[in-house]
Image: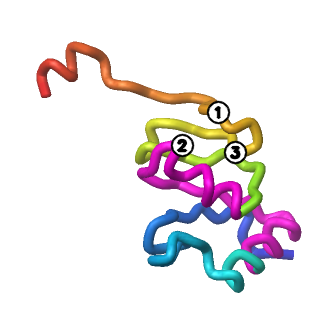
Amino acid sequence: MSRYRAIVLDLDGTLVGEDGHIHPRTLAELRRIAAAGTVVMVATGRSEGSAAAVLEELGLETPAILYNGAAAYCPRKRQLLSSRTMGLELLEKI
């Protein structure tokens, strides 16, 4: 039994190497701990289009946090579950 209930990881510079892929040993370990019951999730500044290939490579069914926390994405359905955008008033101030 794992001592962690969940692990949330960034992509760039954490899971994804300079070649754009996850190291095979890291991938195998993440799959092993997910199979043992630890929830494995991704949180990244990337968009769904940019993160989709890596999420597919991971093979996770858990939602991913995208856009630096502004959206939740379902990799299984390949769609945003929830997102927050700035209102026009705030954008005009910026």
Q: Are marks 1 and 2 in contact (CB under 8 Å)?
A: yes
Q: How far apart are marks 1 and 3 (CA)?
A: 7 Å
For mark 3, what is the residue? 75
Helix, strand or loop for disc 3:
loop
Magenta extent: 29-57
Determine which residue is flagged by label 1. Answer: 79
Please state the horizontal and vertical placement of residue 70, each as a whole percent of the image: 44, 37
Q: Distance between the residues labelled 2 and 3?
A: 9 Å
- Name the residue located 50 percent from the left edge and 45 percent from the top edge: 66
Disc 2 on helix, strand or loop?
Answer: helix
Q: Position of residue 46 (x, y in %)?
A: 45, 50
Look at the numbered disc 1 and give the secondary structure of its residue.
Answer: strand
**Residue type beneath disc 1:** Gln
User: How packed is label 2: few (under 14 Cα within 10 Å), some, or many (20 or more)?
Assistant: many
Q: In this view, does 11 lie to the left or right of 90?
A: right
Q: Name the residue under label 2.
A: 48
Q: Which residue is drawn at 50% across and 29% down?
A: 83
Magenta span includes 42 = yes
Please state if 70 lies on the left or on the right of 61 as rendered. Answer: left
Distance CA(mark 1)–CA(mark 2): 8 Å
Residue 21 location (% of width, % of height): 58, 72
